Image: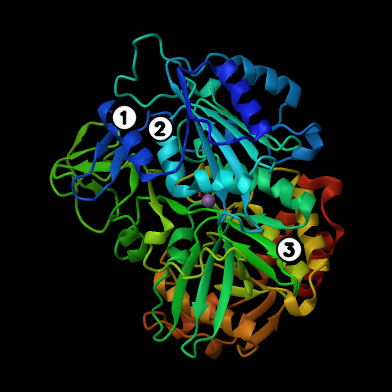
C-alpha cells in the first residue's frame, strides 16, 4: 500500500478503522481523473452504474428503494449534554452511541475496499477552508466526493504532518461474504441500522448504513453544516445553509448576497438565476452552503465550501434553470433519475415529454401516460445530479477566491402563500436575526389535513443542520452582530416568491423575474432604493420596484401590503408554539423584537 502522508494522527486513525472494519484492502485517494475513471469502471462492471451515451463522462446510479434521501430520524447530535443538542436534534449519549456504532462498524467492510479521501471544504489553503478525511467503502461516495469537494494530494500537502482534520467515517453497512459481490444492487443497511452520528465535542462523524447524498457525502451537511456550525460558534464565525450570488448593475457595481431557504424553495434556481431586467447580471458563487468569516475591515467574507452541485433533478429545465441544465451536460453523476432508450436522462418537469419508453428509477420499464394523473413518477422526487461547479455557465470568476467575497445582503425565504410580503428589509441586525428565526413554509394540501395553513418553522433553514442548541445558535448570531461595526453589517431581507390569491393562483411569476426583487435589494444596499417604514420592516414603495408585465398594479399592491391581522396571528403562533421550544436559551433580544413588533401592529 502506497501511503502518501506522514501525519501520525491520521495514520493512527486509518489503522484503527482498518482494524475495526476489516476491509480486504486500503486505498489512499489522490483525486486524479485516472482514479475517478477506474472507480466508475468498477461501478459499471459491477452493474451499479450505467454510462450515459448522450452525455460525455456521465453515469447513472439507481439506489435501493429505501435509501433515497437524508434520514433525519436516524441523524444524531451526540453531545455530552442533551441540552447542548437542544430541542431540534435527536440525541443519544455519546458513550452509548459510540458503543453501538463500534458494534456495527466491526467487520462491516469485509470483502470491500477501504478508501481514504483527504478533502478540503473550500479552496485548498484558504483561511476559511477546513480539511476533512472521509473513510468509506463506497466507490459511489468517492466519485461524488471528487466532484463535490477538492480531493487528494494537494489536500495532504496543505495538511502537512500535524495539521488539523475532521475525521468522517462512513460505511454502507453491508459486508460481503467471500467471493460475493453486490450483484448489481445498491448496498446499504436497513433503516433501523442506519446512523448518521455527529460527535460535536470530538468533531467527528460516524455514518453507517446509507450510501445516499447527505447521509454519505460527509463533507456536505455533516461537516460543512452540523460540525462546522459548532466550530463556528466556538471560533466566532458563521457556517450557514445559504447560497451565495453576485449581482452586477448596468453601471458595473457589484453586490454579494447570501440567502437561506428551507429545502424545496428553489435555492439552486435562485443561485443560477437569469435576470429578466436588461443590463443586470447574476452570477453564482455557491448554491447551498456559505462559510463566513469577518475580514480585517469587519465585513463578513463568504466562501462556498463545496466544489460541485448536488441538485434535485425533477423540476430542473431550460425554463426553470438553463444554467443548471448546461452544467450537467457532461462529467456528471445522476442518481435515481429515469433512463431513455438512447442513453440519456429524463425526469418529471424537465420541459419535454418522455422520449419513448424509459427505465424508471427502480429499474422497471416505464411509458408515460399523460391521462393518468396518479402515474408513479419515472424519476424519484429526490433524484439528483452531481456536477462540477466550474462547469456552470453563470459561475463567478471569483468563486474560488480564498479570501471569500464580502457579503452585502442576507436573505431569508420560505413558501408562504399568504401574509409574508414579496420582500421586507429588517430595521437592523437583531431584527434581521428575528426574521431569520421565524422563517418556514406553509403546510399545503399535500400534507396531513389537520395542519393545513400551519407554518412549519425552519429557522435560518438550519432546522436539520444546526449541530447544537438552536437557542444558542440565535445567541451566536446576536453576538456576531455586536462585533460587526454598523457600516460593515450586511442588510437583512425576508423574501417570498410564493404568494397566492385566495383562488390559489400565483401572484408572482418567480424565476428570472425575481431579479426585480434583487435589484431593489441591491439599491437598498447602495443607499439609493426607496423603502417605506412599516410595522414589520421596510417595504419597497410601489414605484421603487420594477413590476413584471404580467403582474397587475393591484396584484403588486397585494404583494407589498402589510396584512396586519395576519401578522398578529403570526406573532401569536411564534409566541405560543415556536419560541417556547428554546426555553431560557431564547435570547432576550429576540423576545424583545417580538414584543416590539406586537406593539407596532396594535
Ligand atoms: C439539500 C437539502 O439537499 O437542503 O441541499 O435538503
Ligand atoms: Mn441544502
Please provide percent x and percent y for residue 146: 44, 45
The nearer-to-camera label among 1 and 3 is 1
> Which label belongs to residue 139?
2
Q: Identify the residue shown where x is 69% and y is 22%.
A: 98
Q: Quadrant of residue 494?
A: bottom right
| Of the image marks 3 and 2, the number of the one nearer the N terminus | 2
Lateral position of residue 444 relative to residue 35, left or right = right
Mark 3 lies on residue: 434
Mark 1 lies on residue: 42
Please provide percent x and percent y for residue 586: 82, 52
Q: Identify the residue shown where x is 31% and y is 66%.
A: 319
Q: Identify the residue shown where x is 80% and y is 31%.
A: 80
Tag 3: Cα neighbours inside 10 Å, few (<14), some, or many (≥20)? many
> Which label belongs to residue 277?
none
Please provide percent x and percent y for residue 394: 40, 69
- Of residues 282 and 86, which is closer to you in this image? 282
Q: Quadrant of residue 211?
A: top left
Q: CA distance from mark 1 to mark 3?
A: 50 Å
| Of the image marks 1 and 3, the number of the one nearer the N terminus | 1
Q: Report whether the residue tagged 2 is closer than 8 Å to ligand 1.
A: no
Lateral position of residue 122 relative to residue 109, left or right = right
Q: CA distance from mark 2 to mark 1?
A: 8 Å
Amino acid at each position: 500500500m502506497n501511503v502518501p502522508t506522514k501525519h501520525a494522527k491520521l495514520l493512527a486513525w486509518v489503522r484503527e478503522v482498518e482494524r475495526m472494519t476489516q476491509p480486504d484492502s486500503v486505498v489512499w485517494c489522490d483525486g486524479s481523473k485516472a482514479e475517478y475513471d477506474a472507480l466508475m469502471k468498477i461501478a459499471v462492471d459491477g452493474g451499479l452504474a450505467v454510462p450515459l451515451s448522450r452525455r460525455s463522462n456521465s453515469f447513472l446510479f439507481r439506489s435501493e428503494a429505501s435509501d433515497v434521501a437524508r434520514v433525519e430520524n436516524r441523524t444524531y447530535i451526540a453531545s455530552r449534554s442533551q441540552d447542548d443538542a437542544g430541542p431540534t436534534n435527536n440525541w443519544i449519549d455519546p458513550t452509548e452511541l459510540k458503543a453501538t456504532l463500534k458494534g456495527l462498524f466491526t467487520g462491516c467492510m469485509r470483502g470491500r475496499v477501504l478508501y481514504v479521501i483527504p478533502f478540503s471544504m473550500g479552496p485548498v489553503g484558504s483561511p476559511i477552508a477546513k480539511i476533512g478525511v472521509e473513510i468509506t467503502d463506497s466507490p459511489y461516495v468517492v466519485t461524488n466526493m471528487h466532484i463535490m469537494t477538492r480531493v487528494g494530494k494537494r489536500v495532504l500537502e496543505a495538511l502537512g504532518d500535524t495539521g488539523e482534520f475532521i475525521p468522517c467515517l462512513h460505511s454502507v453497512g453491508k459486508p460481503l461474504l467471500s467471493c460475493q459481490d453486490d450483484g448489481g444492487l445498491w448496498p446499504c443497511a436497513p433503516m433501523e441500522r442506519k446512523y448518521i452520528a455527529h460527535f460535536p465535542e470530538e468533531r467527528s462523524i460516524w455514518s453507517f448504513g446509507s450510501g445516499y447524498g447527505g447521509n454519505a457525502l460527509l463533507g456536505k451537511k455533516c461537516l460543512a453544516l452540523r460540525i462546522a456550525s459548532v466550530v463556528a460558534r466556538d471560533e466566532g464565525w458563521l457556517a450557514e445553509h445559504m447560497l451565495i450570488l453576485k449581482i452586477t448593475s448596468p453601471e458595473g457595481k457589484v453586490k454579494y448576497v447570501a440567502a437561506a431557504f428551507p429545502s424545496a424553495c428553489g435555492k439552486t434556481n435562485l443561485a443560477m438565476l437569469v435576470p429578466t431586467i436588461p443590463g443586470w447580471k447574476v452570477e453564482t458563487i455557491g448554491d447551498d452552503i456559505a462559510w463566513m468569516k469577518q475580514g480585517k475591515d469587519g465585513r463578513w467574507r463568504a466562501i462556498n465550501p463545496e466544489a460541485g452541485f448536488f441538485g434535485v433533478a425533477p423540476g430542473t429545465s431550460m425554463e426553470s434553470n438553463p444554467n443548471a441544465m448546461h452544467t450537467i451536460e457532461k462529467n456528471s453523476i445522476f442518481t435515481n433519475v429515469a433512463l431513455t432508450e438512447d442513453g440519456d436522462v429524463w425526469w418529471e418537469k424537465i420541459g419535454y415529454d418522455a422520449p419513448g419508453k424509459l427505465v424508471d428509477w427502480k429499474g422497471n420499464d416505464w411509458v408515460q401516460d399523460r391521462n393518468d394523473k396518479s402515474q408513479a413518477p419515472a424519476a424519484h422526487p429526490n433524484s439528483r445530479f452531481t456536477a462540477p461547479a466550474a462547469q456552470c455557465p453563470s459561475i463567478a470568476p471569483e468563486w474560488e477566491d480564498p479570501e471569500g467575497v464580502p457579503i452585502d445582503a442576507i436573505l431569508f425565504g420560505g413558501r408562504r402563500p399568504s401574509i409574508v410580503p414579496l420582500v421586507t428589509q429588517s430595521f437592523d441586525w437583531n431584527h434581521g436575526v428575528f426574521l431569520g428565526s421565524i422563517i418556514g413554509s406553509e403546510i399545503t394540501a399535500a400534507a396531513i389535513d389537520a395542519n393545513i395553513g400551519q407554518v412549519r418553522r425552519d429557522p435560518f433553514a438550519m432546522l436539520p443542520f444546526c449541530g447544537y442548541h438552536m437557542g444558542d445558535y440565535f445567541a451566536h448570531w446576536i453576538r456576531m452582530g455586536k462585533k460587526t461595526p454598523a457600516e460593515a453589517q450586511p442588510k437583512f431581507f425576508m423574501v417570498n416568491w410564493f404568494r397566492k390569491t385566495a383562488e390559489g393562483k400565483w401572484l408572482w411569476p418567480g424565476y428570472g423575474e425575481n431579479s426585480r426583487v434583487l435589484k431593489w435589494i441591491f439599491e437598498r444596499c447602495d443607499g439609493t432604493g426607496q423603502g417605506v417604514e412599516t410595522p414589520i420592516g421596510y417595504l419597497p414603495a410601489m414605484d421603487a420596484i420594477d413590476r413584471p408585465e404580467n403582474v397587475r398594479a393591484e396584484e403588486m399592491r397585494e404583494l407589498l401590503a402589510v396584512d396586519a391581522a395576519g401578522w398578529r396571528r403570526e406573532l401569536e403562533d411564534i409566541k405560543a408554539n415556536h419560541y417556547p421550544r428554546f426555553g431560557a436559551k431564547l435570547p432576550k433580544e429576540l423576545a424583545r423584537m417580538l414584543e416590539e413588533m406586537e406593539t407596532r401592529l396594535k
